[in-house]
Image: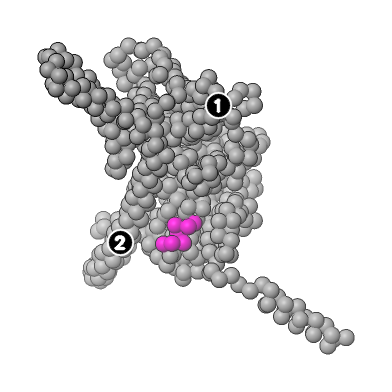
Amino acid sequence: MTNRLWIFALLLLFARLVFSAPTDQPAVRVGVLAFLGVEAANDDWSPVVRRLQAAMPDRQISLVRLDHRSLREAAARGDIDFLITNPGHYVELEAALGASRILTLDSPPAHTPARAIGSTVVALANRDDLHTLADLRGKRLAIVTPEGFGGYQVLWRELAESGIDPGNDLADLKVVGLPMTNVFRALEAGQADAGIVRTCLLENRPTWRETFRVVGARDEADFPCATSSRLYPDWPLATLRGTPPELAKEVALALLAMNAERDGMAWAVPADYQAVHEMFRALQIGPYAYLAEPTLMMLAERYWPWVAGFASLLVGWILYTVRVEHLVHLRTAELRTALAARDELEGRMRAHQEQADHLSRLSVLGELSGTLAHELNQPLATIANYAQSLVRRADDGRLTDSAVREAADEIAIQAERAADILGRIRGFARKRTTVREPLAPRTLAEDAIALFRGMLARAPQVTLTDELPPNVRVEVDPLQIQQVLLNLLKNGYDASRALPPERRRLAVLITDGDGHVCIAVRDHGPGLNAEVRERLFEPFFTTKPDGLGLGLSICRSIAEAHRGRLTVNCTDSRPGCEFILSLPLAAPEDPTTEAQPDHAAN
């Protein structure tokens, strides 16, 4: 019986080796900081694994959950290809190991990835003696770990600016370790007077107001959670020195396509982490620890009982200073190299985005080129007719000054019309770098409509309605926004060109959207079903036989790069679809012109 069991086990092992052969591509290893524990990390980051596995089916996606120290050691050994961690830990690894961010998490409830993380000081609800951060002096404070970003370092800066040194002015700095929920347990057990947790963690407890209170609460605009500190960028996804650039590009493109409503989380282009560098520089920690060099006064205060041995300490201090300076130069050189590599990667990403925008504009021009030739043929035919008329009159001896003047005026008008059409197209197709400037939304819409109508022989009616005051401005790249509006107008034209004339008309409506300007382009075509609407903004998805499926995807990327949104609204109650471009308002200007009435661009 025992021999049969052994034989059966060997057969199972052989079958597993044969039928579960590894894939041709190596595994993609993503290290994450499990600040809430391993199980919570599995739940929080499973959408990333699912998305990458769907985008790269020939690779095995591995999620490695570690604490601060283990994640750094794994990155140093090359055991992971990517890392997802808090901003403070990333800045340290950027300087020490050359980590380079390629994406920034864009997760609710924060409205922007640039202002998403802070620290919240909590105490039991019955602690009426704790209201401000200054009240923490002489109290016991619970923290996860000194390396925690939202769990300690962010609040450390606020305490320092309030004149409190956590190492000297607190009764105890109690380290409770991961997960961060240990802070709540320490407060409930009476082991600390107050504790530090990351922002929005407190709101995960529906009845937290019955048990806890926030100490030192501050008002941060457009941030829905209680915070005791200023806000910093969200978690980055970073590559390491050994990560292949092709793999980094493939992962970045896959995660950028994630949608918060569909996938549970979303990613954005890398945010600016200069605020984290400033915080570390102020605290003299992390890559700026070299700024905390001891001075002679500090040494005198610290070692005054041993003044008799000052001479020997002085010699040791000189040697120590020489070594520190040497390490500073080495670390500074490494930091410059890492920053240069990051800047180079960001430059390549900007160049690729500009190239994609340019190709998208050329694609639109290509699709409209047939009607463009017909539109230019009209002024050219008029010019030819008047020129031939002058020749005939000269041959017949009937050429008069008035006839010459009339023909010359008409030829000049038609030539100016053709030049205006070509000038608009040349400006739209020109490749250039991104330039942001404050402009009136009405001007952007009028330019796009003029270009659209100038490129069509039988352009549909386009009505423009502007409900905004004349001094409203948006800070945008006009060519990129013109590209978005032209794509939307062309899509509306394509959707209704086969319908009766009354349903070919297009409408552009400019309204106020609660701190945003909304430019809506509506057609009266057959509309879109739910399945198409769900995939409408996916790259390479198209309903046109000769389409590339990049227009709306690039348009949404342009809108998000301007901190705006591009959405679609289709209902069964009315025909057609409405695409809405939402852009944030620029700084208000004093009104210098009076409001103009709504008009129709026909």
> Which residue corresponds to the image point at 45% horizontal and 24% vertical from the top-left?
460
Q: Quadrant of residue 343?
A: bottom left
- Give percent across and percent down for residue 490: 45, 33
Q: Is residue 156 left or right of residue 123?
A: left
Name the image quarter holding the C terminus. Answer: top left
Which amino acid type is shown beneath numbered disc 2?
Thr
Eye-nearest disc, 1 or 2 = 1
Residue holding disc 2:
337
5, above or below 101, in the image: below
| Disc number placed over residue 499 in the picture, else none | 1
Return the residue nearer the eye: 165 or 262.
262
- Tell me if mark 2 has few (under 14), some (14-19) or many (20+) residues whose alpha carbon lies within 10 angstroms of its own: some
Question: Residue 546: percent from the left, percent from the top?
Answer: 49, 44
Horizontal placement of 285 versus 392: left or right?
A: right
Quote the CA–CA distance across marks 1 and 2.
Answer: 60 Å
Q: Image point 54% across, 29% down: which residue? A: 498
For residue 178, say whether it is visible.
no
How many residues crowd mark 1 within 10 Å: few (<14), some (14–19), many (20+)? Answer: few
Q: Secondary structure at mark 2?
A: helix
Please provide the residue range marked out in magenta. Answer: 245-251
For image coordinates 44% across by 64% down, the residue present is 243
